[in-house]
Image (tube, rainbow, N blue to C red):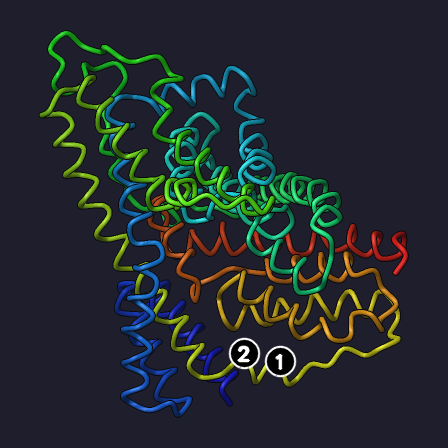
Amino acid sequence: MIALHTAIAIVAIVLLIIKGKVDPIISLVLGCLYLGLASGIGFEATVDAITSGFGDIMAKIGLLIGFGVLIGGLLNTTGTFSRLVTVLLKATGPARIPYALAIALSTIFPAIYVDVQVVLGAPVARKSAPHIGRNGLALMAGALGTGIFCGYVFVVPGLSAISIAGLLQIPLGTYLLYGIVLGPLTAVLTTFVFSRMLHHGWWKPALDEEEFDESTTDDDDPIPGQDGGHRLPPLALALLPILIPLVLIATGAFAGLAGVKNEFLGFVADANVAMFIGLLVAYVLARRTVGSAGTDEAFSAGLHTTGEILLVTGVGGSLGAVIKATGLADVLGSLFSADAGAPIIISILLAWFIAAVLHLAIGSVSVAAITAAGIVAPIVGSTGVAPIAIGLAIAAGSLFALQVNSNFFWMFKALLGLSTQGALKTMTTVTAIASFVSLPFIIAIAFIVPA
């Protein structure tokens, strides 16, 4: 019954928002209350789960969202994103820029937290969108989402990739060898399939997009606070607020993999500290470029945007906490037991299915991957399938259909300027496509690689 009530809650939230036009925050809280009470955890435990889930998410990513949005606002004010998009368009052309974004996110940046990737990548996606055409925002959003999560689950040192490798005792070098090919390949193919869907009418801008306050100026107009017009720093310098946090966090991640321990490195490589350093650099550059008035204006607009994003993301975290409190993961885990000696394809599909069901129910890619790997780990040696193939199957399953019970879904929606329907048509769709697209390659690996 817990699984049924969870499904009812998720479907109800989607219908309230899309069909009933109810605000996502109200819909999410109603879904939390229904699920907590209907599943029998009680009044007090339901409220505790809602409040603790909100608080836990804010503790983990609240500052990241705030710092990231403020960095974006300051860089928009100085025209940095517009110049970056111009450079990218010259280098790749409008038709290839979504693929370039997906490849970069799935190969270069898996060491970075997905929350950091989306708050820093969303402005680039939005700025690029008008150059691609009517469905530009949808295509760039899809490329952003698939690139982030293909790197997260397939490419070391993505968190899910490292977790799966550790639980199944797969050498990180082995996982990296296969994942560094499978991740970007899946991201590119998914972006192509999604572009075909858009070409055939999948996207309705009037219904799927919402107004988004860019808090920026037109590049043809003088920047606020600069009576003489633009006095911009070189693009390489202007991008330091993005590059510095990425380099610091990545350095910390790779140092950890290498077993290097340094207290100062750990401090500056912490995502919150790294993002704050980036914010300081953005603030200094903005003050030098647009003056104090223009900087204050961008800061105020960024704070306004941040509040809305934080609230809906936090309540999304509440839903995840209520689902966790119901004990659904344990219930689902007890339903599955891998069949030792099953045919290779059956073993791969079973590993994929366990992770996919867990993700649909729980709403967390990493939790689904870790839980599925924990369920499968005791019997992986008796399946007759190479552990790397089982691990990649779990990774692919944990990608499946990220949707409204994920706090990332609500961050993605708000930062890209999408309606809930638009977020379902992009984030949920591309993660489902990626999950399926990667399966044939994983099955081939299972047949080729000895157990």
Residue highlighted by disc 2 = 329
> Is 327 left, or right, of 184 in this rendering?
left
Q: Height in image: 161 above or below 198?
A: below
What is the x, y in percent for residue 428? 51, 56
The numbered mark at residue 27 is: none
Q: Residue at point 56% right, 46% down? A: 146
Which amino acid, by three-letter code, is at mark 1?
Answer: Gly
Q: Which mark is residue 333?
A: 1
Q: Give above or below for 75 relative to 339.
A: above
Do residues under tags 1 and 2 come within 8 Å of each other at their CB atoms? yes
Task: Check the image and name the residue furthest to the top.
Answer: 228
Q: Residue at x 59, y 58 (%)?
A: 399
Going by the image, does 405 lie left or right of 372?
left
In the image: residue 70, left or right of residue 425: left
Q: Position of residue 48 (x, y in %)?
A: 29, 80
Marker count (numbered): 2
Q: Looking at the picture, does residue 56 appear above or below residue 61?
A: below
SS label for mark 1: helix
Query: Which residue type does callout 2 highlight?
Result: Ala
Mark 1 and mark 2: Cα distance apart in space: 6 Å
